[in-house]
Amino acid sequence: MQFKRILITGGAGYVGQLLTEHLLDKGYFVCVYDLCFFGTGNLVNIKSANFKILNKDIRDQKSFDEATRDIDVVIHLACISNDPSFELDKNLSKTINFDCFEDLVKISKKNGVKRFVYCSSSSVYGISNKKNVTEEHELVPLTLYNKYKALCEPILFNYTDSNFEGVIIRPATLCGYSPRMRFDLTVNILTSHALVSNKINVFGGSQLRPNLNIKDMISLYELMIESKSIKIQNQIFNVGYQNKSVREIANIVKTVVANNINLDKEIEISYVETNDNRSYHINSDKIKNVLDFSPKFTIEDAVVDICVKFQEKKFKDIINNPNYYNVKKILKLNKS
């Protein structure tokens, strides 16, 4: 281990919870820095001297300063995630997703953090007709969420040097089970519809969506900690696996759910027009060639994992529970 002490902003989130558990199993010290809007999930049960959770806001510079004084690597996941959530309060979302970003970087560097890993998004490419969108493709974000994801990227590289390394990940849309479950991601949404109502509603269908199983995302972040500086310093990596149309994803979900769950009737797929025209087909050759990283888990695996947890009754009121949906939860918090 070249680095041992890891701080994860947003560590109580969809990716963060699984990543925290994984890194602890690997022997790392992990500090979760998160406001815990969606609760702490399994993290509350962790009893380890190598674990600490700070219920703090990333906009609180004093708290972040104190938290990073003995940290080797910051993995920055925290944000108001997805377009609809961002649009609920654009000014508030901007303060969290963009305005405080430079301060996080500056504080991390000042306190001797060795490596800063920033989770951007493959959706920064917007709509592209190119068959393979590489990291050199121009950024044409269609929404404010994607715009500010993109604007953070050059800020990080403005501060990197031989003592402070920076690397940016542009992941595909994630899928699969997490203790902080999300049913507002493409594969997960379609799976929830199949499980609860035997009907999958598809908005559009022809849009291409790059997908990545959350298990591979966890492995990737471990690789970001372990990789040699020469391979990742000031690098940007796409990371995706199966580039599929929404229609293709719906048919995969239909088949996998039917094979894993005893249903009363056949799953129906219906199609509705949509204004969401985002369509892109990302190329992940660079991360394979530079870091020898290849995803191992599929969309099918993600759907199976969700089906297993469904049968184990891990979910409570899938359709109506706001904890599974970022927009619903934020709206509920704003009303309380």
Image: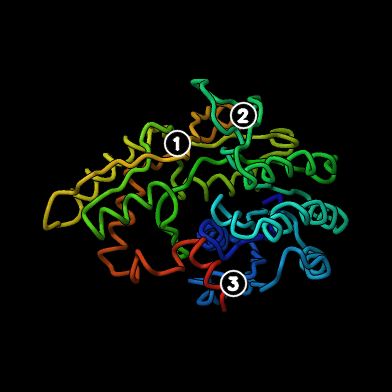
Q: Identity of the amino acid at label 2? A: Val
Query: Picture coordinates of residue 207 (x, y %)?
Result: 42, 33
Q: Quadrant of residue 123?
A: top right
Q: CA distance from mark 1 to mark 3?
A: 31 Å
Q: Which mark is residue 209?
A: 1
Q: Is residue 268 above or below residue 234?
A: below
From the image, state whether disc 3 or disc 2 is nearer to you.
3
Q: Which residue is mark 3?
A: 334
Q: CA distance from mark 3 to mark 2?
A: 44 Å
Query: Picture coordinates of residue 317 (x, y %)?
Result: 33, 70
Farthest right residue in view: 110
Foreground of the two, 305 or 82: 82
Q: Is residue 293 above or below residue 4?
A: above
Q: Identity of the amino acid at label 3? A: Asn
Going by the image, does 132 lie left or right of 237? left
SS type, badge 1: strand
Query: Picture coordinates of residue 33 (x, y %)?
Result: 67, 66
Q: Which residue is mark 2?
A: 290
Q: Is residue 193 above or below residue 211?
A: below
SS type, badge 3: helix
Q: Which mark is residue 1?
A: none
